[in-house]
Amino acid sequence: MKDFWLSCGHHLLDRGPGGGLVVSDEFLKVYFARPELTPPPEACVVEKTLHAALLSDPRRPVDEDEIAAIADADARENWTLVIDFRDHLLRYQTIEAAYLSYVRGGLGRTPPIFFNQLVHVILRNALDGCQDAFQLRAAELFFRAQRVTLHEGSLLSADEERIAGSNPAPTSPLVSMLGLEASTEIDVLSEENAESYFERSDQFDMALDLTAGRRGQAALGEVIAVWIKHLVAVETDVASFVEVKGANFTWYVGLDAEGTQIGDLLWNGEEVDSRTRERVAALYTLRFLDPMAAAEAVGGEPVYLILAMTQEKVLRMKPQNLITGLPVRHLEAVS
């Protein structure tokens, strides 16, 4: 069995009877070992003592007065955020339940990076045993921003963090097209190189072809169905299509902020201009395999899912929208 996404810390977690991930001391220690929390040599005694104590006992209670006694203001801010996050995780039986609480109640001051890390490890759990590199690469859209480009009729998606730098004289057409540094190695995922995904899955250095009708876009729909089933115990069929035309637009979910805006236009019967249509990266119909799982408002019609890029051609998927936006009659978290 080929492993993947070791960087998410999945191997540090336990699995509960219902299949959800149970927080372990080892998992918590990873957060306390982050560079932002490692005291520099000039840090005060209170900060150094707190850091050492939590590395030894990561569940140790920490009150506000203890953090307030830290001399450095930035350090106080960092410790407040990470302790709030830790305490939130420990309130719930599983990481999935903690995530759903965030989704339904709001993130508050929780850093987005922590939220994305939860999505990462939950997907690793939901996709455990998956040997389909296209599904795994498509799943990266759930927790990592993507840069999108149209090249010779193909819509290619590459990791935004990997391509944030640029070089005035890149060495290959793909590097040039995506704005990569010349030293960056990147390939478009294909049937020919799919096996190599597993050994490089933590590098996030393979581009995905999201062109309608091709494997990448279909794989993203398959992962959406896995995500919904894992978190709310509802089975769905998610199929890609090309254009919302003559459809009974009963219900829609934007898979990101841009998709939501486009869905609002369609819902209100407004004209969607050509420049806006060009920003649509993927469209899906979602059908409930059990009609009784859907709210009455759906009336047997499909739910439309819309994924779109920003004007800067960046995709920032919001998988939480699938939890808050779907017309599910009864929501149920993994226990």
Image (spheres, rainbow, N blue to C red):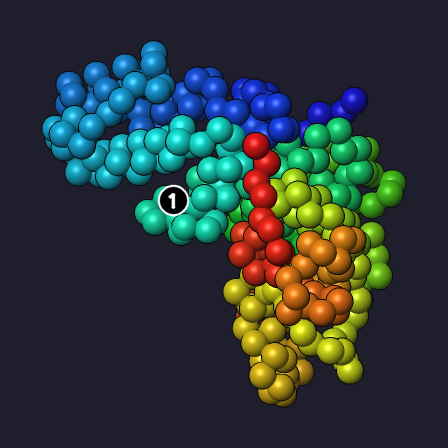
Judging depth in this view, the residue of 292 and 89 nearest the camera is 292
Task: Please tell me whether residue 286 is drawn above or below residue 140 in the rendered image.
Answer: below
Report the quarter where the C terminus lies.
top right
Give the image location of residue 153, x and y in percent. 80, 67
Residue at x-position 61% and y-position 79%: 267
Task: Please tell me whether residue 112 is drawn above or below residue 153 in the rendered image.
Answer: above
Question: For the residue labelled by badge 1, is the local secondary structure a helix, a strand or a loop?
Answer: loop
Q: Which residue is disc 1 drawn over? A: 111
Residue at x-position 15% and y-position 18%: 45
Q: Dot 1: few (<14), some (14–19), or many (≥20) neighbours within 10 Å?
A: few
Give the image location of residue 262, x and y in percent. 59, 74
Residue at x-position 56% and y-position 28%: 21
Task: Please tell me whether residue 318 is drawn above or below residue 79 in the rendered image.
Answer: below
Query: Can residue 61 be seen at all in this image of the molecule?
Result: yes
Residue at x-position 64% and y-position 69%: 297
Give the image location of residue 219, x and y in percent. 77, 49
Q: Is 73 left or right of 210, judged from the image as shown? A: left
Q: Is 120 left or right of 154, judged from the image as shown? A: left
Give the image location of residue 148, x and y in percent. 64, 60
